[in-house]
Amino acid sequence: MARRTAPMGHRARTALFAAVFVLLLAVDQAVKAWARAALDPAAVVTLVPHVLGLTLVQNGGAAFGMMQGATILLVVCAVAVTAGCCVALRRFEPANPAEVIALGMISSGGVGNAIDRVSQGSVTDMLTFLFMNFPVFNVADVALTCGFVILVATMFALARREGVES
């Protein structure tokens, strides 16, 4: 039988969530500001040959360029997702630090892109894969995607563990 860990207290959950949220939001905004100041939209700067590069793109839509011009709707969605993460943090009391980290990552990604939409009129993207044709993305996109993957993985692991224990 698997041993369960003691659940995190409310203060510990809130502190971990806030730390992840603030750190990733600060990194995202700093990288975007740097990219707007330093990168040429017409050029690709290679970071890792044949793997990863930098190019400046302003995206007025959502993922893969969908929903161009839907700024208000996309900002409202980001606020709703962040509020949902905060409610989940409070009401469902995640016991696993990975779940708390995932909620902080998802929230910071949504807020980071919402800040761009409101302040810049579009989202600043700069990371590009050089080995495949994939949309240019940013730190907030990485945080959001990785947070979602971590959250789903921890939920599946918990469901599997509870299935084995019963």
Image: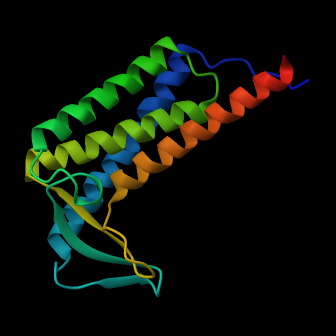
Q: Nearer the viewer, residue 127 or 77?
A: 77
Outermost residue, top side: 91
Q: Which residue is pictured at 35% across the width and 40% down the height? A: 108
Q: Is residue 95 above or below residue 38?
A: above
Q: Nearer the viewer, residue 56 or 68?
A: 68
x and y percentages locating residue 156 in the rendered image: 66, 34
Q: Is residue 24 left or right of residue 151?
A: left
Outermost residue, right side: 1
Q: Which residue is pictured at 27% across the width and 57% down the height? A: 30
Q: Quadrant of residue 20?
A: top left
x and y percentages locating residue 26 in the rendered image: 32, 48
Q: Nearer the viewer, residue 94 or 154?
A: 154
Quadrant containing the C terminus in the rendered view: top right
Quadrant containing the N terminus in the rendered view: top right
Q: Which residue is pictured at 32% across the width and 67% down the height? A: 135
x and y percentages locating residue 77 in the rendered image: 24, 34
x and y percentages locating residue 127 in the rendered image: 34, 69
Q: Quadrant of residue 87?
A: top left
Outermost residue, front side: 66
Q: Is residue 92 left or right of residue 32?
A: right
Q: Is residue 64 above or below residue 116?
A: below
